[in-house]
Amino acid sequence: MKTIDIVGDNYFGEWNKTRTACRSVVIKDGKILLSYETKTDQWMLPGGGLEEGEDEKECVIRETTEETGYVIEPSECLLEIDEYYEDWKWINRYFFGEIKSETERNLTEREIEVGMEPRWKSVEDIIEIFSKHADYTDTDEMRRGMYLREYMALKELL
């Protein structure tokens, strides 16, 4: 498994906090499954934080199901992207997912507030959107970092 590091301009030089997240790459008919925030016009690969007592495959299945309503069968972890910002190390693990069934979504309050919904977008279109990460340098550091991470992940995995 390959690991890629992203070091933010605001990194303190050492970290004392970590968070691990597991993210899915689900492709069907040339389109990729995404979580889309309708109120912020923000795209992301489905996924989220690893909970205590949960293994990585359980996490990526749960997070993808909660956000999109699609239950997946994940691959082995294929890529890790480690991000360093301030005093944090954010570990992102990527899995391909195959859809097995559908169920109800289970969104957090924040996901409801931003109008999160599943969307399918062509691989080319989403890579184009994520490739514009630098456009957010002066306006939205969180989106800039997320789009850079997702762009690097898709370029590596596809």
Image (tube, rainbow, N blue to C red):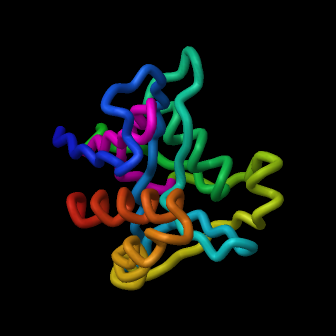
Q: Nearer the viewer, residue 54 or 155?
A: 155
- Name the residue at 81% across, 57% down: 112
At 52% from the left and 52% from the top, the residue drawn is 100
Residue 63: % across, % down: 59, 43
Q: Which residues are magenta?
A: 79-99
State the residue in front, 51 or 101: 51
Residue 29 visible in this rendered orientation of the protein: no
Residue 132 against residue 144 in the figure, above or below: below
* Foreground of the two, 49 or 97: 49
Look at the image and tell me in which quarter the C terminus lies: bottom left
Q: Is residue 21 visible?
A: yes
In the image, is residue 52 part of the stretch drawn in magenta? no
Query: How far from the left and from the top, in percent, is residue 15?
Result: 39, 25
Q: Name the main secondary structure of what is drawn in magenta.
A: strand
Where is residue 92? Give x, y as percent: 39, 41
101 to 122, vertically: above or below: above
Position of residue 70 relative to residue 61, above or below, is below
Residue drawn at 22 percent across, 45 percent down: 4
Tally the marks: 0
Q: Is residue 83 magenta?
A: yes
Q: Left or right? Give the position of 25 relative to 1.
A: right
Rendering quarter of residue 26: bottom left
Query: Is 21 drawn above or below residue 118 in the view shown?
Result: above
Q: Residue furthest left?
A: 2
Which quadrant would residue 132 be assigned to in this image?
Answer: bottom left
Q: Quadrant of the N terminus?
A: top left
Q: Residue furthest top?
A: 53
Residue 148 percent coordinates (x, y): 36, 63
Residue nearest the viewer, comparing 107 with 148: 148
